[in-house]
């Protein structure tokens, strides 16, 4: 009798287990499985340590004026930060301001303040690096590379891994941004962020995500936190549906996309003396 009871209980357990397993499913199928390994969170934290809020003064004809501009930058090499040319230029073209002269541009780069570890608006303790040397910039590709004067303060931070060749992007590829919008504390854009298509030229990539002024210069990363682009702007586009998650059961149509410069295009443009500063052991696309 005992054996029969044990056998009966075992059959019930098997049945319950089977039924419970039936309740688990990849609802949208394996191709749209949105789960992520713990390594994604580790990579997000590691990336944040190498991203900084940049404060740039406004210098006209050698004289510093009131007000500052904000941007985002990140370590592309030990002690070396990359951001946008227009972040260092710090002029309001909407107000008709002319671009900074080469002398003022250089002076503004040299007076940059970079805040690492700026995670909280109140009560945080950012690591502040003051001053820099301008290494190279390109207005057309909208990048500027500076070497921090106080690089020793962030000597323990790794340069972000970058894709050194044209990335293999397909519509719907996730684009993850780490940014300091409006000069505020660090924010991640890791939801509903998708590659849409190339821009007007192949060195520009376009995607749908959320950014605000101050996000310029952010690293645009894939899901393994390799940098594929340098975020620099948003651009108006004809009405089009983008590969976002469906909101309220309706497809999403937008008239604005964000845009980055493909990081391999920046690398190819760098002079040899700067290019050789970037760690050689970089992942390929």
Image (cartoon, rainbow, N blue to C red):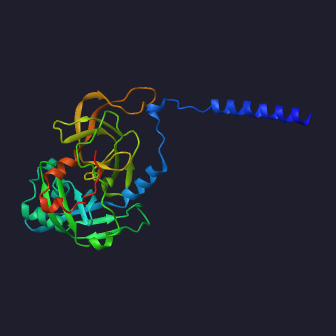
Q: Nearer the viewer, residue 5 or 215?
A: 5
Give the quadrant of residue 114. bottom left
Question: Whole-percent x and y of residue 165?
Answer: 23, 46
Quick check: 90 left or right of 20? left
Taking the spot 36% from the left edge, 56% from the top edge, the residue there is 47
Q: Residue furthest right?
A: 1
Percent across and percent down for residue 142 are 16, 50
Residue plotted at (73% across, 32% down): 14
The residue furthest front is: 3
The image shows residue 220, relative to residue 247, as above or below, that is: below
Point out residue 5 in the picture as x, y percentages from the top left corner: 87, 34
Q: How many marks?
A: 0
Looking at this view, name the residue that lies furthest to the top.
250
From the viewer's perspective, tell me whether residue 5 is left or right of residue 203: right
Is residue 258 among the parts visible in the rendering?
yes
State the quadrant of the C terminus. Answer: top left
Question: Where is 257 relative to 211, above or below?
Answer: above
Q: For the N terminus, give its image quadrant.
A: top right
| Residue at 16% across, 47% down | 94
In this rendering, is residue 239 above or below 104? above
Q: Position of residue 153 (x, y in %)?
A: 32, 72
Residue under the image location 83 percent in, 33 percent down = 7
- Left or right of 268 in this view: 242: right
Left or right: 183 as drawn, with respect to 90: right
Residue 185 appears anywhere in the view: no
């Amino acid at each position: 009798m005992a054996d029969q009871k044990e056998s009966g209980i075992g059959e019930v357990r098997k049945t319950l287990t089977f039924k419970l397993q039936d309740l688990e499913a990849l609802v949208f199928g394996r191709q749209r499985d949105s789960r992520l390994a713990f390594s994604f969170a580790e990579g997000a934290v590691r990336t944040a340590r190498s991203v900084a809020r940049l404060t740039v003064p406004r210098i006209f004809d050698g004289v510093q004026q009131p007000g500052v501009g904000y941007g985002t930058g990140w370590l592309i090499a030990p002690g070396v930060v990359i951001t946008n040319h227009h972040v260092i230029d710090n002029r309001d073209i909407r107000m008709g301001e002319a671009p900074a002269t080469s002398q003022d541009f250089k002076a503004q780069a040299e007076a940059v303040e970079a805040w690492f570890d700026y995670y909280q608006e109140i009560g945080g303790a950012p690591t502040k690096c003051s001053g820099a040397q301008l290494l190279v910039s390109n207005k057309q590709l909208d990048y500027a590379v500076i070497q921090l004067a106080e690089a020793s303060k962030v000597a323990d931070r790794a340069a972000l891994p970058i894709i050194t060749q044209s990335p293999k992007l397909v519509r719907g590829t996730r684009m993850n941004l780490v940014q300091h919008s409006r000069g505020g504390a660090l924010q991640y854009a890791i939801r509903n962020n998708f590659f849409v298509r190339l821009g007007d030229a192949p060195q520009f990539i376009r995607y749908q995500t959320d950014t605000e002024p101050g996000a310029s210069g952010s690293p645009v990363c894939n899901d393994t936190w390799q940098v594929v682009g340098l975020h620099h702007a948003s651009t108006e586009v004809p009405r089009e549906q983008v590969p976002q998650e469906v909101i309220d059961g309706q497809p999403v149509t937008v008239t604005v996309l964000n845009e980055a410069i493909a990081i391999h295009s920046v690398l190819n443009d760098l002079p040899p003396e700067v290019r050789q500063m970037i760690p050689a052991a970089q992942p390929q696309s």
